[in-house]
C-alpha cells in the first residue's frame, strides 16, 4: 500500500457527507406527498438512476462498515416500512422507461446493506410481527418483479435473486414466531407436495409450512446467496417445536442424508449439493443434543463419505463444500463432548481423533475460507477438551510448525515449509489464544511460533511475495495474547526459553513483542500487516502498562493512520520511534538491512529504506556511523551475484549514509570545523577494488536488471566523490581507484532508464571534479570520449547515449575552470544541434533535458559566473526551435514530447535567470504563452505552470489561479483578458495562435470552454476602436486574418483558423463588421487560396463552412455563390453533397434538392449549368 493518501482517511472525511446524503435521499425516493393532504404515500416506482445514486453512497462504506452502525436505525426501518406499505397497494403504477418497481429497489438496497454490514446485523431491523408472514410469503410466491410470463426477457436492471434473498431472510426472521403455525393457517394434506418434492412428509401440515418448504427446497438449488438464505429458513422451519411434533425434522434429516447416498454420475448439480450441505450444517449448529442427537452418527458418516468417497469428488473439489463439512464436523464434536451418554454407535474418542486429524490436514487447504474454518473449529474443539488432551493438540500444532524448518543459529530457513499450512497453524494458535485455551506453561513455544510467523516470508518462482497471510495471523495472535493474558503471565515467561528472541535475552517478553511489532509496523510491505501490528502494539502497551520502554510515546508515534503509507512509515515513523530508545534504534537498523526494506521487491521501497538508514545516522557519533558502514559492507559481501535487487538496496544505503555524513557547505570560517566534525567514510573507496568492481555484464545483461545496478553505483560514486572533495584538498591517488571509477561511470552512462539519469548529474560533477585534482589527463580524456560518442551519427537515434548528454550538461560549468573552453563550446554545439530535427525525437528530448541540467548546474557553480552571450543565444535558439517542434509521425504528435521537455528547460532558465539578456528572450516568452493555450492538455498544463513560476517582468501575461483547471472556462477567459490592454502585437499574436489551437481542434470540453470564453470576450469588445489603445472586434478579426495569411501553408494552424472563422460566422459575430471597413473579400480570397487544389477533405469542408458565412455578407455574396456553384462539380462526391447543401442554405434553389449529388460529375454537368443560369438570373 503506497497510495497518495490513505483510503480510510478519505472515507472518514467523506463519511459525514455521505451519511447526510443518504438521510436525504432514502426518504426522497420512498415517499411522496398526497394531493390535498399532509400525509405521505409510498412511490410505486423509482428511477433507475436514483437507485444507483443510493448505491454510490453506500458502497464506499465497505472499507469501514462500522461507520454506519449508529445510523442504521435511521436507514433500514423506513425501507422496511415502505416495503410493507407496498404489500397493501392495490393499483399498480404504469411501467416507465428507466424506472424500477419500488419493492425491487428496496430489496436491492437492503441487499447492498447486507453486503456492506452483514446479514445478521441487517436482519435484526426487519419487522418480525407474525401478521406480515402471509403477505411476505405471498409476495415471494407471486414474484411479480422477477417472474416473467410467456418467456418474456427479464429487464436488465432487475436482479431477481436479490429480492428473493431479502424475502427469504425476512421469512427466516418471521419463523421465530412463538406460537404454532397451525394457528396462522389450517392443516392441509401434504400428499400432493410429497409427490412433487419426492419427500415423505407428515400426512397433514399447516399450509404456511408447506408453502415455505416448497420455496426452500427450490431455493437451495440456487447458485447465489439465495441458497444459504433458503437453507437457513429451512433450518428455522424444521427446528420449531410444532414442526418437530409433526415429524418434519426427522423427515428432512432423513431426506438430506439419503440425498448424498443417491448421488450418481448423472446427478452432479453442485449447487443443490451445497444447499443440502448448508442445511445439514445449519441444523447441526442450531439444534440441541436432544433434537439432533439420534442423527449425529449418520451425519458424521455422510461427512466422512464426502471426504473419502470417489463418487463425491466433485463435491469435495468445492471450497464451499469443504468449509461446510468442517463446520459440520466441528459441531458434531461439540455435541459429542456435551452429550451425557454415547450418541448411537459412535466412539467419542475415535471420532475426536479422526476429526482433529482431518482438521490438521485442512489447515493446509489451498483455499483461505477452508483454512479459516478449520482453524476456528480446531480452537473451539481444543477449548472444550480437558487440559491434558488440549495440551496434546497444541503440541501437535507446534510440531507441525517445526516440520521442514532448518535453523542456522538464531536464524531459520523456511524455504521448505508450506506457507498455506503455516497460515492455518498460526491462525489456529491465534484463535486458541483469543479463547484463552492455552495454558501459561505453553506460552514460550507459542510465542516462539508467533515471532517466527511475524517474520515469515517466501518468494515464489517468479519473485513474488508469499506469506502475507501468515504474518497477518501472527499479528492477530499477539493481539489476542495481549488482550487475554495477564501481565504476570507474560512476565513469568523467560526470554531465554523463546528461541526466536534469544538475541534479546535481557529483555522482558512484553518488551520483545513491542520491538518486533514496531519493526513490522514500520517496515512490512503489506499495509494491512503494518496496521495489524500497530493495533497489536496498542493493545500490548495499553493492557500491560509499565512493561515497555517509552510505551505511551511509542503508541502515539506508531499510529494506525501514520503507518498507512509505506514511505511515511519508513522515513518518518521509524525515525521518530528510533529516537525514543537505543533498543528501538538497533532493531530498526538491523531490520532495514533485511528482506522487508533494502531487500524489498519493489525499487521505490528499497530507495525509501536507504534514505531511512541515512536518517538513522543523523546525530550519531562517528563510532556508530563507522559501525553502521561496516555492517552494511558485511551485508554487501554476503550477497550473491544474482541478488541484484538486494545489492541495489545495500549500495543505496551506503550512498545515503555517506550523504548524511558529508560536511555541510557553509561559509569559509566554519568549513574546517564542519569537516572535522563530519565522519570520514572515504575508506569506502576500497569497495571498488573488490565487491563493487563489477563486470560489464552487470550493466548490459537484461537478465540482471542492469538499471538497478547502474542507478545505485552511480549514486554511490557521486556521494563518495563529493565527500572526498570536501574532506581532502588533494585526495590520495592510491586510495581512489580512478580507472575503476571511470570504467563504472562509463557503463552507467550507457543506460537510459529514468532512475539512472536522475543519478548521473551528481555523479558526473563529483567524479570530474575529483579527477581534475587527481589526474587531469584522465579527466580530459574521459570528457573527450563523451563528446566523441555524441558527435557520432550512431547516437542520433533512440536513447542509447542519453546518459552522456546528461553528464555533459552536468559538468559544463567545471570545464571552464580548467581553461578548456573549446570543450564547453563543443558541448554547447552538440547539445543545441541535438535539439533539431536532424536527430530522432528521443534524442531531442534528452538533449533538452541535458540543457536543463546544464542551466541548473551553472546556477549552482559560484566560480562559473554567468553564461557568455553567445552561449545564451545558442541555448535560447535551441529551446525556441524545440518549443515549435510539431513533428508528426505514425505515432501521432511526437513533437509534443519535445515541447514538454523544452518547457521544462525554459522553466529552469527562468527560475535561475541563466538566459536573461539573450536575444531570443521575448521570443521564448511568446512561445510559452502560445503553448499555455494550445490544444494538448499536458502541454497546456506544463506551460501554464512555467508561466506561473516566472519572475516579474514588464510584459503582462495571462494568468490563472493555480487550483483552476487549465481546461476551464475561467482559464481561457483570463487568457483573453490581455486583449483589453495595450499589449504588444507579438503577445496578442501568440495568445491568438494558442487560443485558436484549443478553440479549433481541441478536445470536446476544451473546445466548448474556449469558444464560450471567446464569445464572451468579443461581446465586450467595441466593434471599432475609437483610439489606438482600445482593442476592438475589428482589430481582433484583423489579427486572425493576418495569421491566416501568414500560415496558408501550415495546415496545423490553418485548419484551426478556419474552424474559428466558421464558428464566428455561425454565431453572427462577423456580421457586426458589415458596416465597418473590414475587408471581407480578403477572407474570401484567403479561403480560396487555402483549399486551392487541395485533397484534404477536412479543409474542403471547412472552406464550405466559411463560404456559408461569407455568402450572407453583401459584399462577398455574389462571388461566394459563384465559387460554391463551381464546387458542385468537385471530384469528391462528399464535397459535391456539402457544396449543394451550402448553396441551398444561401439561395434556397429548388433545383439543388432534386439531384443525387453523389453521382459522377459528368452526369451532373447539365444540371449544374442550369442551376448556375437560374442563380445568375436571380442575382441580376
Image (spheres, rainbow, N blue to C red):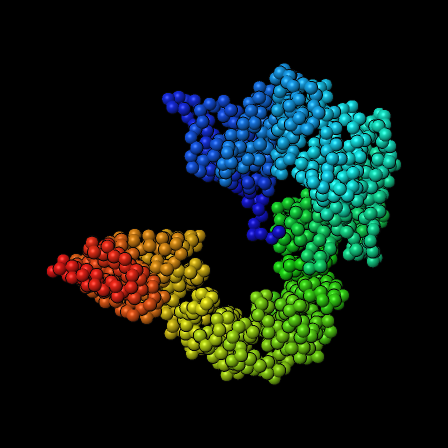
Residue 608 rendering spot, x and y as whole percentages = 63, 58
Residue 110 rendering spot, x and y as whole percentages = 56, 33
State whether residue 629 is above or below residue 1148: below
Q: Residue at horizontal 64%, vertical 23%? A: 192
Q: Residue at horizontal 45%, vertical 31%? A: 45
Viewer can see residue 500: yes
Task: Please identify the quarter of the rendering in which residue 787 is found.
Answer: bottom right
Q: Residue at horizontal 48%, vertical 73%? A: 840
Depth order, front residue of 1067/953: 1067
Residue 963 as seen in the image, left or right of residue 743: left
Residue 1023 rendering spot, x and y as whole percentages = 21, 56
State whether residue 1034 is above or below residue 14: below
> Residue pushed farthest left?
1180
Q: How many marks?
A: 0
Residue 345 rendering spot, x and y as whole percentages = 86, 30
State whether residue 354 is above or below residue 653: above
Depth order, front residue of 382/341: 341
Q: Residue at horizontal 43%, vertical 32%? A: 95
Viewer can see residue 1028: no
Identify the image quadrant of the C terminus.
Answer: bottom left
Residue 782 as seen in the image, left or right of residue 1161: right
State whether residue 412 is above or below residue 733: above
Amino acid at each position: 500500500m503506497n497510495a497518495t493518501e490513505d483510503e480510510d482517511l478519505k472515507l472518514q472525511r467523506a463519511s459525514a457527507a455521505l451519511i447526510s446524503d443518504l438521510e436525504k435521499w432514502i426518504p426522497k425516493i420512498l415517499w411522496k406527498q398526497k394531493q390535498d393532504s399532509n400525509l405521505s404515500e409510498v412511490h410505486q416506482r423509482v428511477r433507475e438512476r436514483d437507485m444507483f445514486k443510493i448505491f454510490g453512497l453506500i458502497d464506499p462504506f465497505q472499507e469501514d462498515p462500522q461507520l454506519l452502525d449508529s445510523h442504521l436505525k435511521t436507514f433500514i426501518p423506513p425501507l422496511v416500512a415502505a416495503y410493507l406499505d407496498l404489500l397493501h397497494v392495490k393499483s399498480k403504477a404504469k411501467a416507465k422507461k428507466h424506472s424500477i418497481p419500488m419493492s425491487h429497489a428496496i430489496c436491492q438496497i437492503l441487499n447492498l446493506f447486507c453486503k456492506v454490514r452483514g446479514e445478521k446485523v441487517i436482519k435484526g431491523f426487519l419487522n418480525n410481527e407474525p401478521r406480515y408472514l402471509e403477505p411476505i410469503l405471498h409476495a415471494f410466491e407471486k414474484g411479480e418483479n422477477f417472474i416473467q410470463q410467456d418467456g418474456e426477457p427479464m429487464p436488465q436492471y432487475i436482479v431477481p435473486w436479490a429480492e428473493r434473498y431479502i424475502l427469504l431472510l425476512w421469512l427466516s426472521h418471521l419463523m421465530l414466531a412463538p406460537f404454532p403455525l397451525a394457528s396462522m393457517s389450517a392443516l392441509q394434506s401434504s400428499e400432493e407436495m410429497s409427490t412433487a418434492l419426492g419427500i415423505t412428509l407428515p400426512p397433514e401440515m399447516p399450509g404456511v409450512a408447506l408453502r415455505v418448504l416448497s420455496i426452500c427446497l427450490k431455493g437451495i438449488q440456487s447458485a447465489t446467496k439465495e441458497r444459504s438464505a433458503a437453507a437457513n429458513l429451512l433450518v428455522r422451519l424444521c427446528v420449531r417445536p410444532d414442526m418437530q411434533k409433526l415429524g418434519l425434522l426427522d423427515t428432512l434429516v432423513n431426506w438430506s442424508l439419503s440425498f448424498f447416498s443417491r448421488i450418481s454420475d448423472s446427478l452432479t448439480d453442485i449447487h443443490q449439493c451445497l444447499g443440502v450441505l448448508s442445511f445439514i450444517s445449519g441444523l447441526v449448529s442450531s439444534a440441541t443434543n436432544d433434537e439432533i442427537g439420534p442423527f449425529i452418527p449418520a451425519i458424521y458418516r455422510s461427512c466422512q463419505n464426502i471426504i473419502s468417497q470417489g463418487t463425491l469428488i466433485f463435491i469435495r473439489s468445492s471450497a464451499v463444500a469443504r468449509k461446510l463439512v468442517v463446520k459440520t464436523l466441528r459441531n458434531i464434536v461439540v455435541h459429542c463432548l456435551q452429550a451425557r451418554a454415547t450418541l448411537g454407535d459412535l466412539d467419542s474418542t475415535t471420532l475426536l481423533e479422526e476429526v482433529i486429524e482431518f482438521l490438521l490436514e485442512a489447515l493446509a487447504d489451498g483455499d483461505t475460507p477452508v483454512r479459516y474454518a478449520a482453524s476456528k473449529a480446531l480452537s473451539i474443539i481444543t477449548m472444550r477438551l480437558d487440559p491434558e488432551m488440549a495440551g496434546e493438540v497444541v503440541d501437535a500444532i507446534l510440531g507441525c510448525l517445526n516440520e521442514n524448518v532448518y535453523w542456522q543459529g538464531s536464524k531459520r530457513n523456511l524455504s521448505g515449509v508450506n506457507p498455506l499450512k503455516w497460515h492455518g497453524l498460526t491462525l489456529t494458535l491465534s484463535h486458541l489464544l483469543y479463547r484463552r485455551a492455552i495454558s501459561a506453561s505453553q506460552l514460550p513455544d507459542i510465542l516462539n511460533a508467533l515471532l517466527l510467523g511475524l517474520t515469515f516470508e517466501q518468494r515464489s518462482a517468479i519473485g513474488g511475495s508469499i506469506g502475507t497471510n501468515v504474518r497477518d495471523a501472527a499479528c492477530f495472535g499477539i493481539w489476542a495474547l495481549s488482550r487475554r493474558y495477564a501481565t504476570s503471565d507474560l512476565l513469568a515467561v523467560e526470554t531465554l526459553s523463546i528461541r526466536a528472541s534469544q538475541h534479546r535475552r535481557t529483555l522482558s517478553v512484553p518488551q520483545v513483542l513491542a520491538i518486533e511489532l514496531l519493526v513490522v509496523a514500520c517496515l512490512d510491505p503489506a499495509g494491512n500487516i503494518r496496521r495489524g501490528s500497530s493495533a497489536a502494539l496498542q493493545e500490548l502497551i495499553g493492557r500491560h502498562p509499565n512493561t515497555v520502554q517509552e510505551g505511551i510515546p511509542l503508541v502515539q508515534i506508531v499510529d494506525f493512520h501514520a503507518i498507512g503509507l509505506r514511505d511515511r512509515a519508513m522515513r518518518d515513523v521509524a525515525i521518530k520511534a528510533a529516537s525514543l530508545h537505543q533498543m528501538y534504534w538497533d532493531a530498526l537498523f538491523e531490520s532495514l538491512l533485511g528482506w522487508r526494506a533494502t531487500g524489498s521487491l519493489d525499487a521505490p521501497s528499497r530507495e525509501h529504506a536507504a534514505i531511512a538508514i541515512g536518517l538513522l545516522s543523523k546525530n550519531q557519533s562517528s563510532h556508530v556511523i563507522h559501525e553502521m558502514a561496516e555492517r552494511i559492507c558485511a551485508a554487501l559481501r554476503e550477497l550473491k551475484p544474482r541478488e541484484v535487487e538486494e545489492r541495489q538496496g545495500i549500495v543505496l544505503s551506503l550512498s545515503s549514509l555517506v550523504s548524511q555524513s558529508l560536511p555541510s557547505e557553509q561559509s569559509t570560517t566554519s568549513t574546517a570545523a564542519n569537516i572535522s566534525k563530519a565522519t570520514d567514510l572515504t575508506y569506502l573507496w576500497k569497495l571498488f577494488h573488490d565487491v563493487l568492481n563489477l563486470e560489464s555484464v552487470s550493466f548490459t545483461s537484461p537478465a540482471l536488471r542492469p538499471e538497478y545496478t547502474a542507478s545505485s553505483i552511480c549514486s554511490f560514486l557521486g556521494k563518495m566523490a563529493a565527500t572526498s572533495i570536501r574532506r581532502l584538498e588533494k585526495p590520495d591517488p592510491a586510495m581512489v581507484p580512478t580507472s575503476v571509477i571511470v570504467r563504472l561511470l562509463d557503463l552507467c552512462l550507457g543506460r537510459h532508464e529514468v532512475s539512472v539519469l536522475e543519478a548521473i548529474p551528481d555523479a558526473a560533477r563529483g567524479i570530474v571534479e575529483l579527477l581534475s585534482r587527481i589526474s587531469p589527463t584522465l579527466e580530459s580524456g574521459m570528457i573527450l570520449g563523451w563528446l566523441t560518442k555524441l558527435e557520432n551519427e550512431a547516437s542520433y537515434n533512440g536513447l542509447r547515449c542519453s546518459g552522456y548528454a546528461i553528464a555533459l550538461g552536468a559538468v559544463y560549468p567545471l570545464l571552464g575552470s580548467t581553461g578548456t573552453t573549446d570543450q564547453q563550446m563543443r558541448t554547447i554545439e552538440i547539445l543545441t544541434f541535438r535539439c533539431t530535427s536532424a536527430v530522432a525525437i528521443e534524442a531531442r528530448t534528452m538533449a533538452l533535458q541535458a540543457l536543463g541540467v546544464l542551466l541548473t548546474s551553472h546556477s549552482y557553480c559560484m566560480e562559473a559566473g554567468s553564461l557568455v552571450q553567445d552561449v545564451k543565444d545558442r541555448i535560447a535558439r535551441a529551446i525556441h526551435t524545440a518549443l515549435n517542434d510539431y513533428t508528426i509521425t505514425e505515432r501521432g504528435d511526437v513533437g509534443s514530447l519535445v515541447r514538454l521537455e523544452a518547457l521544462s528547460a525554459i522553466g529552469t532558465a527562468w527560475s535561475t535567470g541563466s538566459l536573461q539578456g539573450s536575444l531570443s528572450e521575448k521570443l521564448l516568452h511568446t512561445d510559452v504563452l502560445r503553448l499555455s493555450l494550445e490544444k494538448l492538455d499536458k502541454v497546456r498544463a506544463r506551460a501554464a505552470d512555467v508561466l506561473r513560476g516566472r519572475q516579474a517582468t514588464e510584459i503582462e501575461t495571462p494568468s490563472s489561479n493555480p487550483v483552476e483547471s487549465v481546461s476551464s472556462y475561467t482559464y481561457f477567459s483570463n487568457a483573453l483578458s490581455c486583449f483589453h490592454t495595450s499589449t504588444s502585437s507579438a503577445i496578442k499574436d501568440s495568445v491568438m495562435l494558442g487560443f485558436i489551437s484549443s478553440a479549433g481542434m481541441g478536445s470536446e470540453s476544451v473546445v466548448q470552454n474556449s469558444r464560450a470564453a471567446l464569445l464572451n470576450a468579443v461581446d465586450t469588445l467595441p466593434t471599432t476602436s475609437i483610439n489606438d489603445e482600445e482593442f476592438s472586434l475589428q482589430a481582433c478579426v484583423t489579427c486572425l486574418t493576418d495569421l491566416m495569411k501568414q500560415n496558408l501553408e501550415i495546415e496545423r494552424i490553418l485548419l484551426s483558423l478556419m474552424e474559428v472563422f466558421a464558428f464566428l460566422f455561425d454565431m453572427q459575430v462577423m456580421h457586426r463588421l458589415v458596416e465597418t471597413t473590414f475587408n471581407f473579400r480578403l477572407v474570401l480570397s484567403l479561403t480560396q487560396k487555402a483549399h486551392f487544389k487541395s485533397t484534404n477533405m477536412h479543409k474542403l469542408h471547412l472552406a464550405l463552412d466559411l463560404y456559408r458565412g461569407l455568402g450572407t455578407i453583401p459584399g462577398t455574396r455574389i462571388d461566394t455563390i459563384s465559387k460554391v456553384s463551381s464546387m458542385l462539380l468537385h471530384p469528391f462526391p462528399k464535397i459535391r453533397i456539402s457544396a449543394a447543401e451550402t448553396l441551398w442554405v444561401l439561395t434556397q434553389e429548388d433545383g439543388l434538392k432534386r439531384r443525387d449529388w453523389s453521382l459522377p460529375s459528368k452526369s451532373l454537368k447539365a444540371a449544374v449549368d442550369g442551376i448556375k443560369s437560374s442563380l445568375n438570373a436571380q442575382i441580376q
